[in-house]
Image (tube, rainbow, N blue to C red):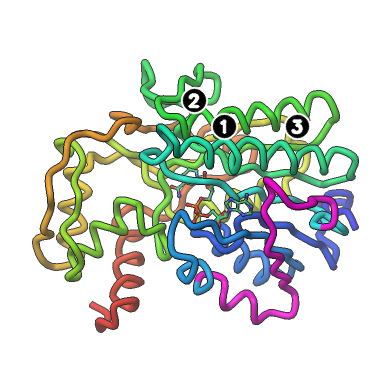
């Protein structure tokens, strides 16, 4: 059943959404939102060892209890893809090997398999289907260190890390399948996503953890680098809009970024304020692959999807701090 054919975008049921990487940070939030909106969801994940599998099982626990959710444990780089796509209307391709720092040296094998090969296999299996949309989770890392800010989708991407190279390759694959076969792909370039369930290797997760009694925070560089943070519910909203909005040209790319940029030094101060105590840090040299600045314009996403970020950094971080307090069994602030 198609979801975009109805006058006025009326959505008919049952509509089946495929979420790859459904047990991950962003995929698990997206899955919950789609279930809450009344869709049937098939989640695919192979529970890679990038971080603890038990964290991913906990992420997806509530969704697994729903009768409208089906979890399929499959590896997109290896396993047969067509059965995963049976009856599917929309694909949200979130599965990937994330993170910049491990993408050098031998680590690159996993990045090329999980980010490039897996995406190509999925796209190829989709090309003969009448999908309503194929939404790809891309990344601000495709830009690298830009000549000017905010970056826009017409700027030449020049990734600064092997991870960014693999995300750009996957984006180009989406565009190639769109141009050759009319596959209705749209790539959403997420800018550093944060919120409850943020991956344990990510900055705010480690910082808040350090503030609540965990190991000291490894602070890479002098804190002057700037990031454009995006709260996870805003990213989920963008995905849903990318699925249900009619008339998106196949192969489109859109920045999905929070409302403002902040230096890591100021972000540390804000987290310390929210946690209510100084946070122990261990100074480290800048990490290879970390860009000096990310900062995007969401003008095009606003034009195409009517999307704009709704959650500011203070609000979003307060939610994340509460989630961490709950995890470690501390009372809410
Ligand atoms: N978190 C961010 O700040 C951020 C920023 C930009 C882009 N992204 C992109 O968003 C997506 C989700 O990121 P996340 O932070 O939720 O990561 P995550 O690691 O929490 O989730 C990814 C999930 O994909 C699964 N997976 C990996 N390879 C797979 C394969 N071959 N087959 C099946 N499952 C596989 C993993 O087991 C994991 O559960 C990724 O594509 C990432 O590149 C994330």
Kindly state the secondary structure of the residue where label 1 is placed. Answer: helix
What range of the chain is rendered magenta?
A: 59-83
Q: Which residue is mark 2?
A: 152
Kindly state the secondary structure of the residue where label 2 is placed. Answer: loop
**Apparent side of residue 287 relative to residue 298 in the rendered image (left or right):** left
Q: CA distance from mark 1 to mark 3?
A: 15 Å
Q: Which residue is mark 3?
A: 250
Q: Dividing the picture into quarters, in which one does residue 224 lie? A: top left
Q: Nearer the viewer, mark 1 or mark 2?
A: 2
Ligand 1 closer than 8 Å to label 1 CB: no
Q: Crowdedness of circle 1 by 10 Å Cα count: few (<14), some, many (20+)?
A: some
Q: Residue at x 32, y 39 (%)?
A: 227
Q: Which residue is mark 1?
A: 300
Q: Nearer the N terminus, badge 1 or badge 3? A: 3
Q: Nearer the viewer, mark 1 or mark 3?
A: 3
Labelled pair 3, 2 in contact (Cβ < 8 Å): no
């Amino acid at each position: 059943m198609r979801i975009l054919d109805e006058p006025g975008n009326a959505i008919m049921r049952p509509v089946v959404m495929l979420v790859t990487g459904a047990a991950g940070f962003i995929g698990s939030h997206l899955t919950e939102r789609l279930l809450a909106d009344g869709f049937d969801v098939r989640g695919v994940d192979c529970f890679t060892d990038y971080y603890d599998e038990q964290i991913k099982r906990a992420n997806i626990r509530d969704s697994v209890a729903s009768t409208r959710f089906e979890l399929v444990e499959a590896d997109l780089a290896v396993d047969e893809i067509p059965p995963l796509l049976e009856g599917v209307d929309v694909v949200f391709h979130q599965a990937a090997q994330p993170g910049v720092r491990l993408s050098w040296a031998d680590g690159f094998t996993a990045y090329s398999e999980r980010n490039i090969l897996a995406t190509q296999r999925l796209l190829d299996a989709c090309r003969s289907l009448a999908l309503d949309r194929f939404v790809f989770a891309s990344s601000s890392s495709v830009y690298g260190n830009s000549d000017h800010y905010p970056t826009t989708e017409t700027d030449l991407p020049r990734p600064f890390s092997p991870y960014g190279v693999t995300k750009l390759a996957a984006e180009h694959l989406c565009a190639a399948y769109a141009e050759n076969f009319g596959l209705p792909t749209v790539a959403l370039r997420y800018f550093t996503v944060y919120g409850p369930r943020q991956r344990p290797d990510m900055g705010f997760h480690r910082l808040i953890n350090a503030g609540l009694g965990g190991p000291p925070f490894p602070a890479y560089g002098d804190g002057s680098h700037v990031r454009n943070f995006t709260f996870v519910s805003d990213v989920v909203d963008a995905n849903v809009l990318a699925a249900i909005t009619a008339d998106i040209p196949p192969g489109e790319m859109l920045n999905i970024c929070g409302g403002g940029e902040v230096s890591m030094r100021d972000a540390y101060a804000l987290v310390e304020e929210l946690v209510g105590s100084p946070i122990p840090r261990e100074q480290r040299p800048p990490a290879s692959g970390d860009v000096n600045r990310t900062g995007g314009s969401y003008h095009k996403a606003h034009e195409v999807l009517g999307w704009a970020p709704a959650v500011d950094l203070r609000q979003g971080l307060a939610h994340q701090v509460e989630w961490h307090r709950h995890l470690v069994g501390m009372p809410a602030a």
